[in-house]
Image (cartoon, helix red, strand yellow):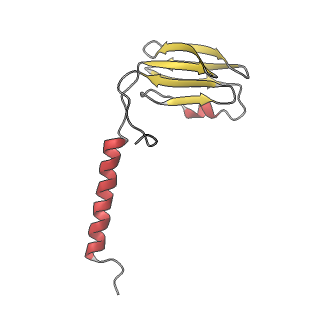
Amino acid sequence: MRILRAGDVLILLAGTALVGASYAAFWSPRVEGDKAIISVGHDTVAHASLLEDRKIPIDGLLGRSLLQIEDGRIRFTESPCPGRYCIHTGWISRTGQVAACLPNGVVVEVEGGAREFDAINL
């Protein structure tokens, strides 16, 4: 007895093509942003252009975080939080991307350009 028949292979190929087309339509790369909104807690503390390279110190709930802007992107380089997950997030540059140091209360969101759908709001 054969495990896979011709119809099974056809359905698998069609499903694979459908998943690939969905990925291309809904999760394709986003538009590069041109500014970052930096918040501590519920308060916006800074608007930073991603077009000029610089370092930005931000005082959070636990201490000072350091953000670096370079080549149109931004990242955490220093933070007083224990896990340093914010630093491991790395560079963000596309509209809607977020990096956050939750223990320190610092959140960075890239804005500018058209916002795309993500997995949550489809």
Residue name at image x 33 percent, y 48 percent: 22
Q: Residue 97: give x, y in percent of width and height.
A: 47, 30
Most extreme residue toward the bottom is 1
Q: Is residue 112 left or right of residue 40?
A: left
Q: How far from the left and from the top, in percent, is residue 81?
A: 71, 29
- Identify the residue at image location x=51%, y=13%: 47
Residue 28's place in the image compared with 55, above or below, is below
Reply above or below: 1 against 48.
below
Picture residue at 55% right of the left edge, 13% below the top: 46
Which quarter of the rendering shows the N terminus? bottom left
- Quick check: can you spot residue 54? no
How many numbered discs?
0
Residue 81 can be seen in this image: yes
Residue 35 at what x, y percent from top left?
45, 18
Looking at the picture, does residue 23 appear above or below residue 109? Answer: below
Residue 103 pos. (x, y %) = 69, 30
Q: Is residue 105 left or right of residue 74?
A: right
Point out the image quarter for the C terminus.
top left
Quadrant for residue 34, please give it: top left
Q: Quadrant of residue 63?
A: top right
